[in-house]
Image (cartoon, coloured by chain):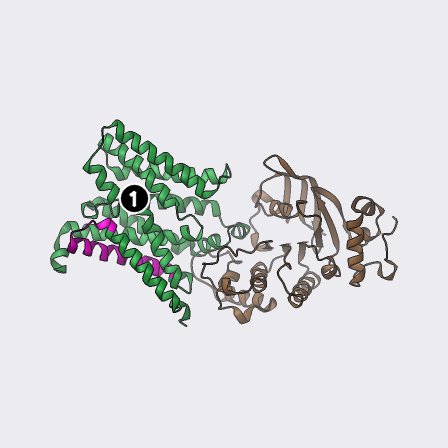
Chain colours: A brown, B green
Amino acid sequence: MPSVIEAENLRFAYVRVPVLEDVSFRVDAGDYVGIIGPNGGGKTTLLKLLLGLEKGQGNIRLFGCPLEQFKQWHKIGYLAQKSPVSQSGFPVSAEEVVLMGLSDRHGSGVSLSELKQVHEAMQQTRTREYAGRIFHDLSIGQQQRVLLARALVSRPELLILDEPSTALDPESREMFFNLLGELNARRGVTILLITHDTGEVGKYISKFMYIDKTLVFYGTKEEFCHSQTVAEKLGAFAQHTIDHLHNHGRCPLGGACGEIKND
Amino acid sequence: MISEFLSYGFVQRGLAAGTLVAAACALLGVFLVLKRLSLIGDGMSHVCLTGVAAALLLSANPVYVSVPVVAAASLGIMKLTQKFKIYGDAAIGIVSAAGLSVGLLITALAGGFNTDLLGYLFGSILTVSADEAVLCGLLLAAVLAGLFFFYRDLTSACFDEPFARTRGIAVHTLNTALVVITSVAVVLAFKVVGIFLISALLIIPPVSALLVSRTFKQVLWLAACFGVFSVWAGVYFSFVFNIPSGATIILVNLLVLAGAYAWSKTGGLKNAR
């Protein structure tokens, strides 16, 4: 499997307060990685480092290319934790926001193929019905779906999503995770997703990454449920996550799972 | 009366320069307002005082001396916010205070400049030279070219800067270009409305346009139209009633803002299909 992300010895500190220390991992094409961990554990910072939005120490390669030289940004779709709701006076339509996900052209013109891509992404996220409405007039959940369409519009090979389902109602959340699962399963889109919603998303995720200032665990869902190491290191959190997976019928160990298994 | 008014060469030059600089300021102001950088114009205008005072001391053209001084100050504001993580409004306050105090110090050391300096503080649109009018034309041409070639990059960076960076858009370069070109606009605008009132040309037309527009392109068009209208109406009223042109231009802008607010209550262009 070709690697999509390679991270080596990542370190980051906010004004000398360490946020991430010595994080190394590799994400292969087609992986669906759920990033979990406590609040303030550095999950969002990790994604920002991967996207070049924060500068830390260490090496990052995206699609085999060092981050500093990476130019193929259309291969990556990104949905941030906070939507740009502060731009409440910005008169752009939902459709124009989705168009912002395409950056091949710089001037004001829009090509037919771009419009086709925008409509396709809005169709996928069920946002076409309010394509012409002003973005900030939409509800937070609707805005989030429009922003997902913006992340999908360039037909990315890697999706980086930071707690994307927080503002969604249960129906939208299910649609959202089903869509991600489909993109991963059918189109082979690699997904890196920060979530606290392990029950809902658990059936699709292939790997878990537990971040708490450093990389505590990174492995398959089976390893996560099966590992004594996980139990020792993560204790109640691991049991809670496994219970959550089990209660939603998404535990890889099926009926045998009631408690953490020994290695 | 209007034809007599327009027949004077100095009036034509003043109106031409005012039209060009008002349109440029309004277009730049749209991005500054949406990026919460409205007050950068205020800070730059205070730094203008340093440039003008230094130019008067050296018997040089204030425009040519002020452009590099104000551009350096605007880059200083950016550096303070990015490198030293100081809040934008605080950085503007710091640079603004520095500019004002250095300008006042130079003025005091030179023994005061009397009427020359007052002309720059309160504006004297009818004293615009032909060279300065040409510079105003170049400024607007640069702003329009930037909008034409980088419209999508600019709107994307203005709407959601982190996301724009993940699209490979050179956000830092765009921001630098925006503040440098704004500093040129601020310097050229001090002849039109005066140092004290420059920021109003950057802020009021975009705010009026944002109140009533449905699309971003409407905001740009309306802001430019409001800015230009305020200059024409302001200069006309100042001629008719023999009152200061700079202050009159800003008062017209405020009346346009009040009108836009009233229009926004009925939906403005937002109801138009």
| Left or right: B49 as drawn, with respect to A153 | left
In the image, residue A88 sits, relative to residue B55, either above or below, namely: below
Q: How many marks?
A: 1
Instruction: Specify the principal SS of the magenta part.
Output: helix
Identify the residue at image location x=30%, y=37%: B49
Identify the image quadrant of residue B268: bottom left
Identify the image quadrant of residue A155: bottom right
Q: Is residue A77 visible?
A: no
- Residue A188: x, y in percent? 68, 59
| Left or right: B249 as drawn, with respect to A53 | left
Q: Is residue B55 visible?
A: yes
Is residue B240 one of those drawn in magenta?
A: yes
Q: Nearer the viewer, residue A243 or A21?
A: A243
Identify the residue at image location x=30%, y=33%: B103
Is residue B216 one of those drawn in magenta?
A: no
Identify the residue at image location x=37%, y=38%: B96
Name which residue type carries label 1.
Phe
- Residue A142: x, y in percent? 57, 65
Decide: few, some or many residues near mark 1? Use Cα within 10 Å; few <14, some 14-19, many ≥20: some
- Which residues are the magenta region? B219-247
- Residue A55: x, y in percent? 58, 40
Q: Nearer the viewer, residue A70 or A141?
A: A141
Q: For the N terminus of chain B, which image quadrant?
A: bottom left
Secondary structure of the residue carrying numbered label 1? helix
Residue under label 1, please give it: B196
Identify the residue at image location x=40%, y=59%: B210
- Residue A98: x, y in percent? 53, 62
Chain of the residue under the numbered disc 1 shown in the image:
B
Q: For the C terminus of chain B, which image quadrant?
A: bottom left
